[in-house]
Image: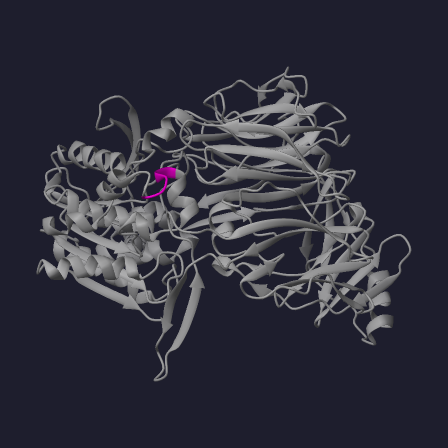
Amino acid sequence: MKNKRRALSLTLSVFFLVVLAFPLFSQVRGKELYELLSKNRALISFEGISRIDWTPDGKAYYLYKDKTFQRIDAATGESSPLLDDEKIIAAFNRLSGKNLTVLPFNNFDFLEGGQKICFSFSHRAYIYDLSTGQMLFYFPQGEYGGVRGRMYSEVLSPDLTKRAYIEDYNLYVKDLNENEKALTTDGHKDLRNGYPDWVYPEELSQYEAFWWSPDSQKIAYMQFDENPVKLYPLVHDISPVPELEMQRYPKAGANNPIVRLFIVDVKTRKTVQLETGLDTNVYLFRGQWTPDGKIFTYQRMNRLQNLIELWAADPTTGKTRLIIADEDPCYVEADFDLTFLKDSDRFLWTSEKSGWNEIYLYDLSGMLIKQLTDAKLPVMRIEAVDEANGWVYFTGLENRGLESHLYRVKLDGTGFTRLTKEPGSHRINLSPEALFYTDTFSSFEKPRRVALHTADGTFVRELGNSTVTQKFKDLELIPPEHFTFKSADNKFDLDAVLYKPAHFDKNEKYPLIMTVYGGPGAKMIHNRYLMNDRNQALAQLGFIVLAIDHRGVSGRGKNFQNLMYMNLGQIELEDHVAAAKHVGNLPYVDETRVGITGGSYGGYMTCIALLKEPDVFHVGVAGAPVTDWRNYDSIYTERYMRRPQDNPEGYKEGSCLIYARNLKGHLFINHGAVDNNVHPGNTVQLVQELLKLNKKFDLMIYPEQRHGIRFLRYGEARIEYFIEHLKPDIHE
């Protein structure tokens, strides 16, 4: 009996120790749980390899560990040294005068198909020939900045003897012995040679503006004439003497930069201008040489953005000819894949002309050889072409765009196969020569894992997996709920995800917050792991949190996306209202306490929701909102709205300003003082309308902040505002 009592005592002691050890997690609620989820990413850890770099032959990948690089055979998993460290260190020490005993770098680039490597050390760039053991160095040019913090640097010629770069808006080349040559001399801030303006990178992803020919003899480049574009002021006034920044920014309906294309011979400096047509009110972009360097191609799109053309240029004469054209009754998305085959005569092109993004095989005469896919997925992008075996690998979307998968199809259009099987989101990293791929996968039910497969989809081995810690399990979070609801016109099923606090009680009434972005193609709902995302953290403060897809999102075909044409801010708001009412009918949601929040386009949606639907939305926190589409840039706005003079009613109905009189709830507007994307004038104009109507609202301006506000106070103030005005029961 004594031993039994002792055993019972020990058991109770252990029990109480366990209970006392875990209250931090099993009983965490409210603000503490919000903070824990927001900042403690280790609650779901990842073990193994999350990302790999492939060797140029595609047969292996390599990892940096213990100050050296290991080559991992993809098929067998066997490890061996990737480089001959001793030879590289010896060559480096001879050249630099150092006395190192380990590699002087922890990352590098393969050059010439793996024959050479390039690395940086102490402001020098080194090139090492793996076969001869020869090493050389040069002094690279300094980087220079562009849109959204993008940094530009010099570009090595394919033969590795020269590099091209931009300085003072002119194009230069320099050999490895520091001999410099200016290829252009007329450049200045408003005539940019090889250096893009603001709007082309932002809206066409045109960050590069010059391209070496494959033989290293020529460079094709874009010239941006900014003189027709209106200047807008941004004031940096955190010091007694403010600094005035003037930005060229083409607004909807106003003048765009004039873009010209040139090809310059690097040796002779002879320059030819490409014959791109008399109409300068077009978009010229996406320069690309054929593999043999005999033709330079580019894309041209009209100002309405409903016609896109692929053109071929003779690099010697500048004469051009049309290859193919695509047209849409509304607009074209300027993100077509163009992939040349090795013969330099055939190419793959993705097009939405059927209503779905599909892959087509053409020759350079413009003749359609074969439509390779007719899957109505749509295709996302071409990932690789294995010409030796005749396969094209590509990613695509399924199930209303919820799932992403890897597929392949033969170059003759046969053999269409989906390689990834499990429902969810698959991110693919194909090896060179398309021998293997890694699949980074997650779904609503399963956290991230990474696996290695052969090109035909055969599983090789797991590389890494997420570990949900016991501490995370002890938080007893409620999994987000995916569901569908009907669009406002009752014609479509739309996807949504709803989050509940861990302390959820079905007998209570909770305020609702909708997190939004909005806009054409802006899909919010994907079948991926959401247990520890930001919305889950927000819900722990006592909110029901809701994110939805609206009519016009991507992944459901071009006709579905065209539903938003000419009416930004209208049908997506109708669908957000429909979602709020759908969820508001749930017995645990208080439809009289509904909040909404988002930044950029989401800031616009927040403002127009509070102003146009004041009986549905009661509290809003907006970041950097567009308040009137006449204020935003030409390429984005006109793609979906045409010019203001073409669509006055659409611009009027999509403006926040005309609804200012309706404000009844609590609106909190946040804007960076020097935002060069969505100008602060957007907020100033709305503020003026609200003040004229004697409306009460809240405003925060953040000094020296661009489009992304970096101050911690922004996030804190957003949360405090919702707690103050939606009054959740936080259950602390």
Residue extending farthest right: 132
Image height check: is 198 above or below 321? Answer: below
Camera sees residue 1? no
In terms of depth relative to the viewer, which is nearer, 499 or 570? Answer: 570
Image point 85% across, 54% down: which residue?
130
Which residues are drawn in magenta? 640-644
Task: Tell me if 690 is positioned left or right of 425 in this view.
Answer: left
Q: Residue at x 9, y 58 (%)?
A: 693
Q: Is residue 327 magenta?
A: no
- Residue 346's quadrant in the figure? top right
User: Which x, y percent locates residue 366?
Assistant: 66, 25
Residue 294 placement (x, y as % from top left): 78, 38
User: Which corner quadrant holds the C terminus?
Assistant: bottom left
Q: Is 634 located above or below residue 76 in the figure?
A: below
Q: Do we see residue 385 in this rendering? A: yes
Horizontal side of 150 relative to 575 (left or right) equals right
Name which residue lies at 36% across and 62% down.
709
As rendered, which of 423 and 460 lies closer to the eye? 423
| Place of residue 484 in the rendered image (x, y in percent of width and height, measured from the top left) | 28, 27
691 sits left or right of 46 in the view: left
Colouring: one colour
From the viewer's side, name the closer residue of 491 and 242: 242
The secondary structure that dominates the magenta segment is loop
